[in-house]
Image: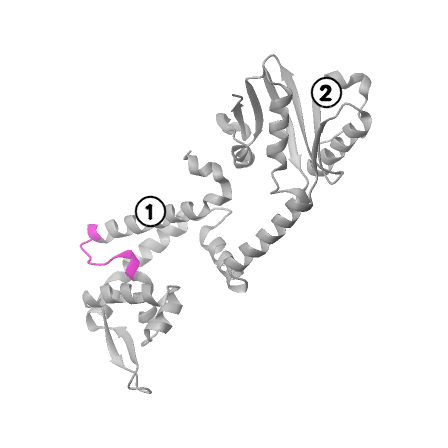
Amino acid sequence: MNTIEKAGILSIAAKLQNVLDTLRDAGNLFYQAHNINFETKWFPPIYVLSIVNQLSVTELAKEIGLSHPAAIGLLKEIEKNGLISSVKDSRDERKRNLMLSPKGREMVSELKPYWDSIASTLSDVTANPHNLFISLTEVEMRLDEKPLLERLNEKADQILKQSKDREFTIEKCDNSFALNLAKAIRRELFSYPVDEEINLDVWESNPTYFLASVNGLPAGYAAIYVKGNEVEMDSIAVLEQHRNQGIARHLIQYIKQSYPSMKLIKATCEIHQKSFFEHLGFVLKKAEKEHNRITMELKIV
């Protein structure tokens, strides 16, 4: 795993760039292998102009999602290779439109079977429950509804306000009241059965609980077993309304401070929880694909 992936969702731009570079590089090598003088970055304007006969630079830039300066640079490159030409607009002689040149139309005819091959291959690659093309289309729709910068500023204002107003505490659950609050969170977030009440008389056979609260209200918990100089994570969770506030990270930090002689925290979890624990600093130690389980470890230094 790359270090940047530990950033979780913050690394999405890097991941998208990596996928984009992979697609472009493979596409270019594919065209070269078949002796076709074409580049993957030319596809959007060439495809659009094969459907719409004439468009201005501004109209074409909007169609392919590029800024006007970026579109001009790309179109000049394509025009230099003889695939497009410009003509006067029939309604406004001051305006010039772009269209495929005869060489460009011939190129599109030649490329169609190769585009079919690329489309089929990409369909295979993205054929999973989280179809990449569909997901990206949905993201684009959301960003059309409200630009990302506006969303970022709104969320920053909200988070900063919450951080100023928030009183955050963590306690070791050494009384029935705190224990039952932690257990209540566990019941709400996990599907497996949980006892309705915790009996202090048999608590030694149960994990040790830590409760996180925000402004006096239960927000999350962690449950651990202490074995020698290792801590084994039984479970950790944060209520949905309190997520993305660093509560899970604070719980882990509190546990580390509570057991200064401990060398390691281990967590056995399902594969889909891997990114959550990586965000907390854990690294993958062992995977059991047969049982869809993995073991994560966090060294205490």
Residue 113 appears left or right of 289: left
The amino acid sitting under disc 2 is Asn
Task: State whether residue 135 is above or below residue 296.
Answer: below
Question: Which residue is rendered at x = 74% and y = 41% of the image?
Answer: 215
Circle nearer the N terminus (2, 1): 1
Residue name at image x 63 percent, y 42 percent: 243
Q: Is residue 297 left or right of residue 236?
A: left
Q: SS for tag 2?
A: loop
Local secondary structure at mark 1: helix
Counting from the top left corner in percent of width and height, residue 6 is at 48, 36
Q: Residues within 10 Å of mark 1 (few under 14, many from 20)?
A: few
* Residue nearer the viewer, 124 or 222: 222
Which of the image's four quarters has the N terminus? top left
* Disc sitting over residue 22 in the figure: 1
From the viewer's perspective, tell me whether residue 9 is left or right of residue 260.
Answer: left
Q: Is residue 38 magenta?
A: yes
* Rendering coords of residue 136 (x, y %): 47, 55
Q: Is 35 drawn above or below residue 234 in the view shown?
A: below
Give the x, y percent position of residue 165: 69, 46
| Residue stretch rendered in magenta on the structure | 32-42
Q: Residue at the top extreme?
A: 228
**Label 2, on which residue?**
206
View extreme (front): residue: 164
Q: What residue is at 20 percent from the left and 57 percent from the top?
A: 36
Q: Is residue 248 above or below residue 21?
A: above
Nearest the eye: 113 or 281:
281
Could you tell whether 58 is left or right of 282 in the image? left
Tally of marks: 2
Q: Is residue 195 visible?
A: no
Residue 26, magenta (yes or no) = no
Q: CA distance from mark 2 to mark 1?
A: 49 Å
Badge number at residue 285: none
